[in-house]
Image: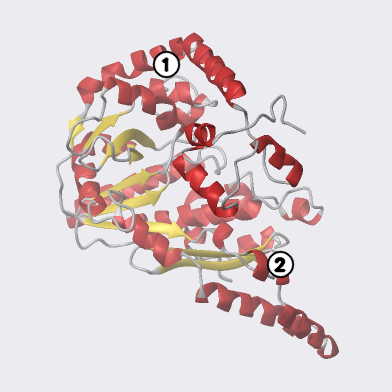
Amino acid sequence: MGPSGTERAWSRRDLRSVFGRSAVTWWRNVAPGADIQHLGCLGHLGAWRVLDTDSLSRLREAIRRRAEADRTVLDELREEVRPLAAQVQEIKSRSATAVSVVAADGGNNRLEFDPYLMQVIRIVDSYGRLLVFDVISTSTDTRELSEAQFDSAGNPRTALGHLMKDLGVGYLHELSPMIPDSRRRREREAGPSWVQVYRDLCEWAALYHELTRTSFATDTLVVRDGLLRSKLFTRELFVTMCHRIEEAIERVYREDRRRVFLVGLAKRSKVLTRYQLAMAIEGILAGDYPCFVRVPRELEMKAFVWPEWAMSEAATEGSEVPKFVAGVLHFVRFGRSPHDQVWPVDILESQADAAPVILGYLLADAREGFPVPNYPRCLQKAHEQAALTGLDIAMLQDAIFEGIRDTLPERRRTVLDSFRLKGDGAALRYE
C-alpha cells in the first residue's frame, strides 16, 4: 500500500533538509542499503511520527504570522530595556577572599532503597567545612526537631537554633508557615514538601551563622547560591534576619576594619528570561569586556506574577512592608565576549552602591571558574564539597540498610539481607 496523507514518501533530500545531514547518516546506519521509506509509517512500528514537508511548511507559515502579530510584545520589551544601555558599567577585577555556603541537593541523592524517605541535610562551605548535618524523614516529629536545635538548658546547639533564638521563635512552625506543627504532622494534613523547606531554612541559617558569628581575617565576599529573596519565613522574619546580617557586617568593619559583602547568584531568573532577547537586540551588555547593569524595580515587578517578590524597602515607602526581598538585582556578564552567559546577581540592598567594587571581587573569582567558565569558583567548589555521589552514596545506602536491619527482630534480618543481595535487575538493564 502506497503512502498517503501525512504518510507520504520521504526522499533523502527531504530528510536532510528537515533533520540535517546526520539524519541521513543515522538512517544508513540502522538500515544499510535500504531505501528511505515514508517516516510516518514508523509510527506503526512503535517508533515515532514526524510532520511531512507540506505540514511543516504550513506550520512555519503559521508561526511566522503569529510572530508578526505578536511583534508588538517584543517592541514593548525593547522599549523598556532601552534606557539600560546608558547605565552599563565595566567591571574591574579586584582581589578578595570569596566563600560560598551550599547545601547538598536532596534530589541528587539517588538511593536505591529508602523506605523511610530519609533526607540528608548536609551543608558545607567552599573550603569543605561542615556547617550543618542532620538526617530527617517525612514522618519526623517537627516538635522534636525544633527541640533538637537547643540543649537541655535552652541554648542553641545548631546554626538553625541560633537563628531561631535571634528571631525570637521556639518552634519551626513559628519560623516558617510551610513547616507543619506536630498535630498536622500526626494527622497527615501536611505533604512531604516541608522536608525541602527545612533544608532551605538550614541553608539560610548556615549563611546567617557565618556572617554573624565568624571573624574575618581579610576582606571577604560571601556568595549565596540563589538570590537574596525568600518566601519561607513567617511575617517579616526574613527582613529581620537580613537586618541582623547588616548589623553584623557593620560591626565587623567597625571593630576589625574588614569589609564583608553578601551577594546571591542564581542560575536563572524570570526577569532575565523576559528581557534577555530584547537586551541582545538593543546591544545591552554587548561590550567586549566584563560588565553589569542594575535592574530597575519596575522591570522586576513586570516579570513576576506576585509583585511583592520585587518589593524593597526603598521602593515601598508608605505601602505594604516588604517581606521577601533583601537584594538589588543586577545582570552581570563576567566573560569578555558578548556571547558569554549573563547571570542574575542580587547585592545586599544596603551595599548596592558598592556594586562596582563587589562585582570586581566576584569577577576575580569567576575568572578562575572551573569546570564552568566565567562562573564563581567558590560556588563550584562548594557544590563539589556538598555533592553526595559515588562512594558517599554507597556509604549512605549501607548506613540505611544497617539502620533498618538493627530495628528488625533477629529472625527477620535475613529477609532484609536477601532483599539487599537481590538488587534491581531493571536498573542494571536500562541505566
Which of 277/220 is in front? Answer: 277
Which residue sits furthest bottom?
410
- Which residue lies at the image location 71% right of the left edge and 24% below the top edge? 5
- Which residue lies at the image location 29% right of the left edge and 40% below the top edge? 340
Q: Which residue is mark 2?
A: 426
- Which residue lies at the image location 18% right of the left edge and 39% below the top edge? 91
**Residue 96 picture quarter:** bottom left
Q: Secondary structure at mark 1?
A: helix
Against 51, residue 348 (above or below) is: below
Q: Position of residue 59 (x, y in %)?
A: 58, 20
**Residue 57 picture quarter:** top right
Q: Position of residue 40 (x, y in %)?
A: 68, 35
Q: Nearer the viewer, mark 1 or mark 2?
A: 2
Against 34, residue 4 (above or below) is: above
Q: Identify residue type, mark 1.
A: Leu
Q: Identify residue type, mark 2.
A: Ala
Badge 1 or badge 2: first in the primary sequence: 1
Which of 124/396 is in front? Answer: 396
Sort mark 2 into few (<14), some (14-19) or many (20+) by Cα contacts within 10 Å: few
Q: Secondary structure at mark 2?
A: helix
Q: Position of residue 170 (x, y in %)?
A: 59, 55
**Residue 88 picture quarter:** top left
Cα separation between marks 1 and 2: 48 Å
Q: Which mark is residue 252?
A: none
Left or right relative to 404: residue 373: left
Sort mark 1 into few (<14), some (14-19) or many (20+) by Cα contacts within 10 Å: some
Residue 246 makes an appearance in the image: yes
Q: Which mark is residue 74?
A: 1
- Which residue lies at the image location 75% right of the left edge and 85% below the top edge? 417
